Amino acid sequence: MYYKDDFYKEFRTEKELCEYLEEIDSRAEWIRVTSKKLKVAAAGEETCTEVPGISLEALEKDTLSHSRLVLILPERICYIGNSAIKSLKGRARIDGKALADVDKKTLAEILNKCLKVARGRALIRFCEGKIRAVLSGDEKDYAIISMPDMYMVTSAYIHGDYEKATFLNGYADHYSVTASWQLEDTKLTDVYKELMQNYGRKTDKDIKAVVRITTSDVGVSGANIFYSLQEPTRNVILGNALKVTHKNCKGMEDFTENIESIFDYYREVLKGVMRLCDIWIEHPANAMAGIMKQAGFGKKLLAETVEQFKATTGDEPCSAYEIYCGICESITIARQEKTNERGLLALEEKIAGCVSKRWHEYDIPGTVKY
């Protein structure tokens, strides 16, 4: 059983990923309970309910190293995993950085006072020996999407609709699951060449695309579809994700509709990125630094990315597209510095958000400031 809060697993084949998802799903539970009936306590104050396959001693030891909290339900008492803390605070309708500084007994008291006046029901995800999420129990607020079904539909569509699809990798932890496929298809290349020609950039190179599917059962992500483009010498992240949120959705029906439209989505996000070719920047290093700072990049990664861009291309005026491609290189830098998979996924989303920034606002002269 994968009970530890810092658990993660990587997959090299689709078979490994599917077997893992089926295994997890077979042991997991969804529990609906009136929010007012929930109570939080510091770990060690209550005796938790036995969990088949894992000792309470091991669960308590791991919990004391992480959340240090337990959740008291009407029919059982369970240890709380780290992934549940954000949603638990959300159910209690409280948040704030100060909560991270209070001791766990005080935090439990605050949560309990708020839960007493909470409305509606909670939808609780119990998985691998702990509570992993405390979500809204109203079906309009959170639709459960089966992970095994979702990835099965994705795989079937990708392998059936593209000339060649190769599974690259998968990753799972208690927050989310991700899988990536490399796609090779004439229609992908044709759209790319057409857009390049529209912007005066001729190319005779075939390209490959990577489609990544990320989803979560604990409320940190919807069922999201990302694209990136593998040009001959670099990878380009293609804008924001095509998303199915768990709120107000029809579950697998909505996700299947998105999967069936991923080629149209590829065309649209590629157009969005290529529009950056029309934006001319006089001070590229400053613009890159300003865009990355506004997007929330860490100072060290920002500086390394800008310096690499300057060393590679100089500081001559260029299009925002060239700068954006330079920002995409931050993924390579972060990977070299051993950033974990969840961190890389978050970084991809920051990069994608740069496409829609107001680039000219950051095109200013002067010394680059990090």
Image (spheres, rainbow, N blue to C red):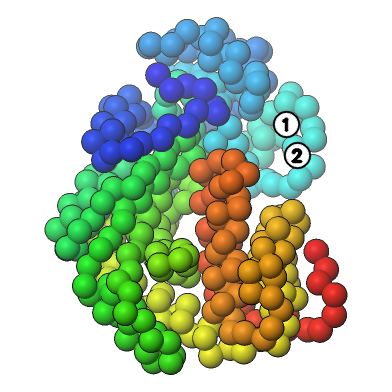
Residue at the spot 53% in from the left edge and 11% down from the top edge: 58
* Percent of width and height locating residue 15: 23, 36
Q: How many marks?
A: 2
Residue at the spot 41% in from the left edge and 68% down from the top edge: 231
Callout 1 secondary element: helix
Disc 1 + disc 2, Cβ < 8 Å: yes
* Percent of width and height locating residue 162: 19, 63
Quote the CA–CA distance across marks 1 and 2: 7 Å
Residue 217 image-quadrant placement: top left
Q: Residues within 10 Å of mark 1 (few under 14, many from 20)?
A: some
Q: Horizontal placement of 223 versus 349: left or right? A: left
Q: Please tell me the numbered disc located at residue 99.
A: 2
Callout 2 secondary element: helix
* Percent of width and height locating residue 91: 57, 43
Looking at the image, residue 221 lies above or below residue 163: above
Residue 54 image-quadrant placement: top left
Q: Is residue 279 visible?
A: yes
Q: Residues within 10 Å of mark 2 (few under 14, many from 20)?
A: some
Looking at the image, residue 89 lies above or below residue 260: above
Please report whichever mark, 1 or 2, sits nearer to the chain's N-terminal start: 2
Q: Please tell me the numbered disc located at residue 107.
A: 1
Residue at the spot 74% in from the left edge and 60% down from the top edge: 303
Which amino acid type corresponds to the residue marked 1 in the rendered image? Leu
Q: Quadrant of the N terminus?
A: top left
Q: State the residue in front, 216 or 343.
A: 343
